[in-house]
Image (cartoon, coloured by chain):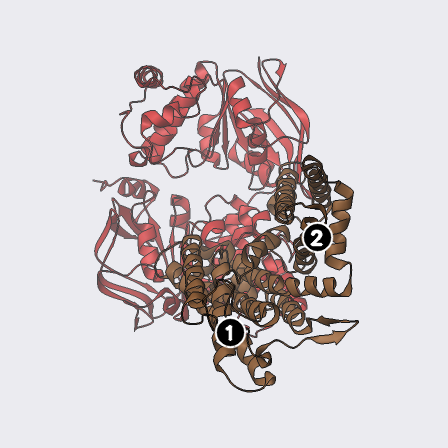
Amino acid sequence: MRVAAPTLVALSVALAFGVVLLILAGAPPFEALWLLVLGSFGSASKMAATLLAWSPLLLASAGLVITFSAGLWNIGVEGQIVVGAIVATWVARSLPGPVWVILPATIIAGAIGGLIWALLAGVLKTYGGVHEIFGGLGLDFVAAGLVVYLVLGPWQRTGQASTSGTNIFREEAWMPEFETFGTAWPVIPVALGLVSVFAVWLLLRGTRFGLRLKAVGRNPQSSFLLGIPTNRYMLGAFAIGGALAGIAGTVQVTAFHHKLVPAISGGYGFLGILVVLLAGFSAVWIAPIALFFVAISVGSTQLDLRLGLDSAFGGVFQGIIVLFVMIGGAWSASRGSFSQAVREEP
Amino acid sequence: MGLATHDIRKHFGTIRANDGISFTIESGSLHGILGENGAGKSTLMKILSGFYEADSGEVDLDGETLDLRSPADAIKVGIGMLHQDPLVFLPFTVLDNFVLGSPGPQRLDRSDARAELERVSGELGFRFDSERLARDLTVGERQQLEITRLMWLGAKVLIFDEPTTGISATQRDQLFLTLRSLAENGLIVLFVSHKLEEVEELCDSVTVIRQGKVVFEAAMPITSEVLVEKMFGKVFVEEDRDPAPFGAPVLELSRVTIEEGTTHIEDLSLSCAAGEVVGLAGLEGSGQRTLLRACAGLLAPSSGLLSVDGNNLNKASYRDHLAAGVHYLPAGRLEEGLVEGISIAEHLVLTSEDTGFFINWDAADEAARQEIDDYSIKGRPSSPAEALSGGNQQRLLLAMIPDEVRLLLLEHPTRGLDVGSAAYVWQRLLERRSDGTSIVFSSADLDELLRYSDRIVVFFAGDVFAMRNVGETDGEELGHLIGGKVRG
């Protein structure tokens, strides 16, 4: 079990640190933390909002587990979400027909968009010798520029171009929601997210593809000599990771905004990297950790409304948690459990 | 006065690498530490030099108990270690390497340092060009640089971990002279090795470690039979050669030219038949690896014809070579052979011929248990590769060789292995040979080359220097050929 005692200790320390920060900011700390809980789970509609934010984070994180397994730092995940959203928007705007046609079409479109953007970074790495961090970062900027251009240019809102986004899609292009307990529940996005996490877990745990991917990630030289086509596997990891990020983009445009906006990624790509780091690069812990993170994000809007505290506190808190958990991991690795960290004796 | 350890214990998980080690070594002695791979020598030396902290026990130097928490602590009290691969920064000059890691003010006074380098190396009888890049030094010269540096830092104890691996015979002789004079000047020199002849030749006294415990301590001379028995608990009998008839040629090189860096193998014609073993001799880096890599398809010959079983593989990729039944086992077991963090069972799945999408882990564990039995690997299906000792890693690599192999290319197949593991490796390889597999291997061990090869190709300065059938040569001639001299 990788997420164990040191992680819990680190979480407690991070919480204490957050409390100190709140005190320094002049806010009543326990009320603030309670508001975080209320803001994310306090009512049916808040729960639905949290779940809707959870879905793209799950999708992006699941994809990142795949690329991390292949030893790749897929920093381009943000751009892959954006391009997925762009291609999904294009389909939503131009494809006629009922919801059961447009729903699968936008999901596939998002996946293809993210996949292409990821493969660009992958080809740059495998055949161009450009490290995926630099290639991905560059492509993130290109995607961010592209979405602004589309929103203000060709796809501008009727009447007047605005950074508030394109026209709202017609309702057939909205991801269907399910009404019960007085609010609309994002069942399809959550299902997409959970299924992708489970599929990634299964892929890495139980398939030859997953095992080879792990081998390539840990030692490309040995893997190549064992006869594994390493470039193809790296590109495969990029393709899967990109497709899942692209679907996160689809969720963002068709389930959340119902239009394309400049900040369409919602930062879920980078947040996903933190989630995966915290989960120890394994799919098992992604779902609860991602839920915890979005709860902080969604809940922290309450801090702004009720306490006049900047909602950026949520992001600060997330960052602190990751830092402390990583410090805790390094600390426990350098102490008694050294041998476990190094060799993980059975 | 001297170095003493008291009940040193260190465990990794369930493995007790050091299980209560106590010994005393007088100042001014050249002391051999013997033991097979995985006996606990390296762990002990890493504790002495501050790389590991012992779980319990203490180390005394000249009557004082030491508090060793890092290599810097060890160097401060005068314990220095020379690693198998000298810790030299290759892109740096000799002088930069010399001053690196020395205590002192941030600002370097280069002319002072140069004077010091000349003084200390002069005392030791070494000569350096202080502006030369370390990468241009031979491994032997890098060792000399490390010795100089550690002596300058005030070493009282010098630990040498397998220092003769990868250096020439001349450099070895010079190293031994240095070690002797260091000991005569009152230093404690610890010589860690599993080469019996070297310990016999060099050391005044010896400690044998087996399974984490000291099993034997004595002043030399001790006969090698006794030492082998102490190291392994039993004495090995050399098997007689059994010359099996060769089959059709498998590997054929016809006027092949291969270029890689400074290596330039020109116009080589060579064949290796089914059931034949060809040994590649030569100093490290003389071209043996280049030839093996070319035969494996990792390097394309610039001219000539390379074929396996009559199929032209000149422009074929590495994977085409694999498909043609060529299997290459490089020297770096954990760098180029196995994957850290992946278990024995997972390695066997990676190389198994099953290609189904899903893995049946129960069957995979069962298959792994079978191979672990077959190859006497000390480990469990779930043991990761890096937790295995060198010998067990090599056994796992042997287990990973597919059944239908036509040509085995092995780089230093028994390097770093103890006598028992080495004999086991060859037993399995010879079984392959009897099944009609061709074997080409490189080795630095003349004994191994003479014992197992049918033909020996000697490399010198990046090209093939001579070829001998095994009945027509002996160790002395090979030694000369490796040094670039024809006996006459």
Q: Quadrant of residue A57?
A: bottom right
Q: Secondary structure at mark 2?
A: helix
Question: What residue occupies the far front of the structure in this picture?
Answer: A159
The residue where tag 1 is placed is A88
Question: Which sits in the foreground, A88 or B468?
Answer: A88
**Chain containing the residue with disc 1:** A
**Chain containing the residue with disc 2:** A
Q: Residue at x 36, y 53 (%)?
A: B279
Q: Is residue A286 above or below residue A116?
A: above
Q: Quadrant of residue B247?
A: bottom left
Q: Is residue B410 above or below residue A259?
A: above
Q: Is residue B487 above or below residue B294?
A: above
Q: Quadrant of the C terminus of chain B?
A: top left
Residue type at the position of mark 2:
Gln
Residue B315 screen position, x and y as percent = 28, 67
Q: Residue at x 48, y 64 (%)?
A: A162
A15 relative to A75 in the view: left or right: right
Chain identifier, colour brown: A
Chain identifier, colour red: B
B135 relative to A89 in the view: left or right: left
Residue A229 screen position, x and y as percent = 43, 65
Q: Residue at x 36, y 16 (%)?
A: B120
The residue where tag 2 is placed is A302
Mark 2 crowd level (few <14, some 14–19, many ≥20, 10 Å Cα): many
Q: CA distance from mark 2 to mark 1?
A: 31 Å
Q: Can you see residue B436?
A: no
Closest to the camera, between mark 2 and mark 1, is: 2
Q: Residue at x 64, y 38 (%)?
A: A331
Mark 1 crowd level (few <14, some 14–19, many ≥20, 10 Å Cα): many
Residue B30 screen position, x and y as percent = 49, 22
